[in-house]
Amino acid sequence: MLDRHRDTIVVQKPDFAIRKLSVIVTAALNLSNSNGFQAMSLRDLSKASGVSMGGLYAYFDSKTTLLKMILEEVTGQVQRVLADPPQTMTIDPVDHLKWLIDTHIRLTEAMQPWFSFAFLEAKNFPPSERRTAVDSEILTESYFAAVIDRAVAEGRFRADVSPLLPSLIKPLLQEWYVKRSKYRRRGVSMETYIETVQDLVLNACLPERRS
């Protein structure tokens, strides 16, 4: 995030800047996920983070800039992780699809507050930032669509697999980080959830599972 926004962040010492930026963003995500980003004021953020108002302005000039920084980091991490599968996972498109499901869910587990923020606050974003959130969803769907198309072309998946499937996978991925507490109360582990989503998707694709 520091590297992405060097034109906005004026703090020169990288180690100090990273530590302070982590505190600020963590506080912003906690406040937003509790009360909403719109309701959060910079004064609230200053109090929660322990960073003065002047200190906050050394990292961003407005709440909108902070919002953009968070959204771009979510999109950047999705692109960095999902676009670089291990070579062993790309040999068979079925393995690749299972890897995408597994990796996406594990990524959102590691960055749960970030992804929850992007999902829950999207309806309140300004137009430009709302477009960023939509583009991030489209990017995720594109990785799944490409693998599914390849599997169909190679005869690994049925020819009549619905073109809507990539869009239908996305809510299953979102379910984990948006309603994670529900599954914890039920004793559902992340591994069990991953396997269940993989089975649901493959049941909609593999010829031998059609019946």
Image (cartoon, rainbow, N blue to C red):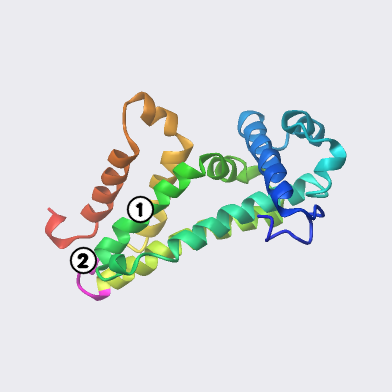
Looking at the image, residue 106 lies above or below residue 143? above
Q: Secondary structure at mark 1?
A: helix
User: Does the CB distance between marks 1 and 2 fall below 8 Å?
Assistant: no
Residue numbers of the magenta segment = 153-161
**Secondary structure character of the magenta stretch overall:** loop
- Which element type, helix, strand or loop, lies under badge 2? loop
On the image, the x and y values in percent for residue 115 come to 54, 45
Give me the residue at 32% from left, 35% from top: 189
Residue lying at 32% horizontally and 57% vertically, measured from the top left? 99
For the residues marked 1 and 2, what is the alpha-carbon distance in whole angstroms?
A: 19 Å
- Residue underneath mark 1: 101
Query: In the rendered structure, which amino acid carries the disc numbered 2?
Result: Arg
Give the farthest residue toward the right: 54
Q: Which amino acid lies under the numbered mark 1 shown in the image of this protein? A: Ile
Single out the residue that lies furthest toward the top: 185
Rendered position, 194 above or below 92: above
Is residue 185 highlighted in magenta? Answer: no
Give me the residue at 81% from left, 47% from top.
62
Vertical side of 143 occupied by 59: above or below: above
Percent of width and height locating residue 179: 45, 34
Is residue 167 left or right of 61 when viewed as pictured?
Answer: left
Q: Residues within 10 Å of mark 2 (few under 14, many from 20)?
A: some
Label 1 CA crowd tier, 10 Å (few <14, some 14–19, many 20+): many
Question: Where is residue 108 shown, x and y percent of the image?
Answer: 47, 46
- Nearer the observer, 95 or 198: 95
In the picture, the quarter occupied by the N terminus is bottom right
- The mark nearer the N terminus, 1 or 2, is 1
Query: In percent of the image, x 76 and y 51: which residue is there?
Result: 65
Q: On the picture, is 139 further left or further right than 40?
A: left
Q: Which residue lies under the disc numbered 2?
A: 158
- Does the rendering let one see residue 161? no
Q: Position of residue 9 (x, y in %)?
A: 78, 54
